[in-house]
């Protein structure tokens, strides 16, 4: 039996835009499609206060986790030193 060929037709939808700076096919004009992945950059701008607040919150989350791993590593070194050096 012969297998049926699956014919894939282009319906015009953009799954992943390939408009990248520096590529030969780069187009300066933004698409007028409302379903575009890229949004206006002015909506995502943060001030210096918001940036500092976000950085300190990030450190507040990551610092306890990092201290936990450092403590566990120190306990591992102490434990293995006591077991192997006896």
Image (cartoon, rainbow, N blue to C red):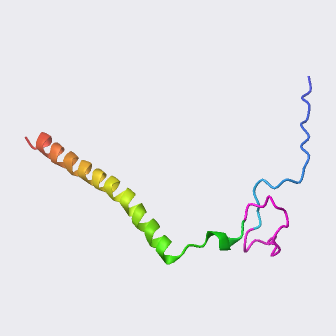
Question: Quadrant of the image for the N terminus?
Answer: top right
Left or right: where does residue 80 sit relative to residue 52?
left
Farthest top residue in view: 1
Q: Residue at x 56, y 73 (%)?
A: 46
Q: Quadrant of residue 83?
A: top left
Image coordinates for residue 28, horizontal then vertical, percent: 80, 76
The residue nearer to you, when weighing 50 against 16, is: 50
Q: Residue at x 83, y 67 (%)?
A: 31
Image coordinates for residue 43, horizontal then vertical, percent: 66, 70
Residue 28 located within the stretch drawn in magenta: yes
The residue nearer to you, when weighing 69 against 83, is: 69
Q: Residue at x 81, y 56 (%)?
A: 14
The residue nearer to you, when weighing 65 against 72, is: 65
Residue 53 located within the stretch drawn in magenta: no
Prevalent SS, magenta region: loop
Reply above or below: 3 against 36: above
Q: What span is colored magenta in the figure?
A: 20-38
Image coordinates for residue 19, horizontal then vertical, percent: 77, 67
Image coordinates for residue 8, horizontal then vertical, percent: 89, 43
Question: Quadrant of the image for the C terminus?
Answer: top left
Q: Quadrant of residue 40?
A: bottom right
């Amino acid at each position: 039996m012969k297998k049926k060929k699956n014919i894939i037709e282009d319906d015009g939808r953009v799954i992943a835009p390939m408009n990248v700076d520096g590529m030969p096919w780069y187009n300066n004009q933004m698409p007028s499609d409302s379903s575009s992945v890229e949004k206006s950059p002015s909506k995502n701008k943060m001030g210096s206060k918001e940036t500092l607040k976000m950085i300190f919150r990030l450190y507040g989350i990551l610092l306890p986790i990092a201290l936990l791993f450092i403590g566990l590593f120190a306990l591992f070194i102490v434990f293995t030193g006591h077991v192997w050096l006896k």
